[in-house]
Image (cartoon, coloured by chain):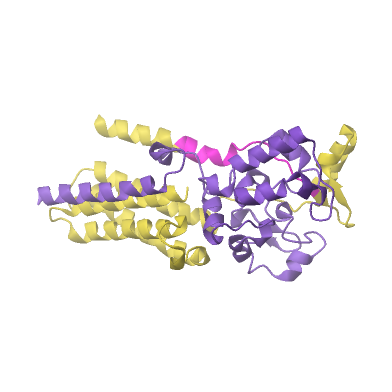
Amino acid sequence: MRYWTIVVLSLCGSAPAFAQEDVWAGSLRGDYTLDNGATLYLASAEDDAQASQAAAMAKINTPAYEERYFTANNIHKYLGIGSIAAAAGTLIAPKGEDGAHEALAKTAAGLGVAAIVTGLLFHWDDFNLSDGAKDPDNLHVMLTTAGALGYLAAVSAAPDGGHAGFGGAGAIAMAIGIKLNW
Amino acid sequence: MKKQTTLLALTTVLLLGSIPVSQADGGGFFSFFSLERKKEVAPMTDATYNKECGACHFPYQAGLLPEGSWRKLLDAKALSDHFGENAELDDQTRSHILQLLVANSADKSSYKRSKKVMGSLEAGATPLRVTEVSYIKHKHEKVPEKLIKQPKVKSLSYCDKCHMEADKGNFDDDTVVIPEHGNWSW
């Protein structure tokens, strides 16, 4: 019962986090350049009809933009969050070799390592050790790397006693690291 | 062994738990655990600011510059020659906008990009243009000049020409669509 409560609460908690990408206030763009080079100043238009006509024309000439769900950044994000979900699954799955516990633990480690690799590939320019340990990106790198190492240490130490400490510490480090860049 | 595991987990929790404390802003320790996204810069939702400043240019988020910059820019005398234009405001409006910008300036913000802006500035620096901030310059280094200077963009000052969610304070590179080029990142 306790496990189901944790799962339900985690799922409920994650919903507003993802929904926030779409709940920002309405948009207001300053001006738009038309194909002929003319600039439309929407906010300064005095007449409502003129403003809506200008908005319609601007829409035609503004590059098409649709939110994309499978971008490099998002894939990196999904891998990191997926590793935490798998680690949480490991915690609640029945213990034992060749079972769900082991499979989920290895999944968490794999996703964690993949998150680190994609982070290094896609965000190489975003962090620099010279910016210091208080830089949010440096902290993110350090903690999430520690998280993935924790997962690997847990998988490698299992089934000996004590591996849960590595796994748990890894999941916490990963979660805090992701939250710093959330 | 069980004792060692507990000790390891406890030590780790305490060590990692100290990081949000060291990072804590005005929101305090528990604000760290909020699900609100703070990866970008705080959006500007004030109607007066968006109307007055957005009438002539992109209404830059307060979190893109430190307090000192906004104080210089919103000085009554400075507004009469605002980058070559007369942008004078009545005292009440100017005071309202200044308070808004100061309260949400980069040095007071807990949003990640505002922290990056502050981290890239020399102590006490007060750049007057967002494009003079080292972090923002660095982020645009790889964009070819011909894409920036094309008629549909003109310069880096026109954030919303390429950053499709700039008005929401989102400058993530996967929201960048450059005219005559397309998506900046995959």
| Colour used to depict chain A in the structure image | yellow
* Residue B60 image offset from top left, x and y in percent: 68, 48
**Picture quarter with the C terminus of chain B:** bottom right
Residue A3 location, quadrant? top left
Quick check: can you spot residue B32? yes
Q: Is residue A178 above or below residue B133?
A: above
On whether residue A150 falls in the magenta region, the answer is no
Q: Is residue B112 left or right of residue A61?
A: left
Identify which residue, B120 or A159, lies in the foreground. Answer: B120
On whether residue A25 falls in the magenta region, the answer is yes
* Residue A129 image offset from top left, x and y in percent: 43, 67
Q: Report the magenta residues as a range.
A: A15-31
**Which residue is rendered at x = 46% and y = 61% of the image?**
A119
| Colour used to depict chain B in the structure image | purple
Count of number-bearing discs: 0
Q: Is residue A118 left or right of residue A40?
A: left
Q: Is residue A40 above or below residue B125?
A: above
**Which residue is rendered at x = 43% and y = 49% of the image?**
A180
Q: Is residue B35 left or right of residue B67?
A: left
Residue B74 location, quadrant? top right
**Which residue is rendered at x = 36% and y = 61% of the image?**
A113
Identify which residue, B150 or B107, lies in the foreground. Answer: B107
* Residue B133 image offset from top left, x and y in percent: 62, 60
Quick check: can you spot residue B170? no
* Residue B96 image offset from top left, x and y in percent: 69, 35
**Which residue is rendered at x = 15% and y = 53% of the image?**
A162
Work out which residue is located at the far front of the displayed protein and give it: B77
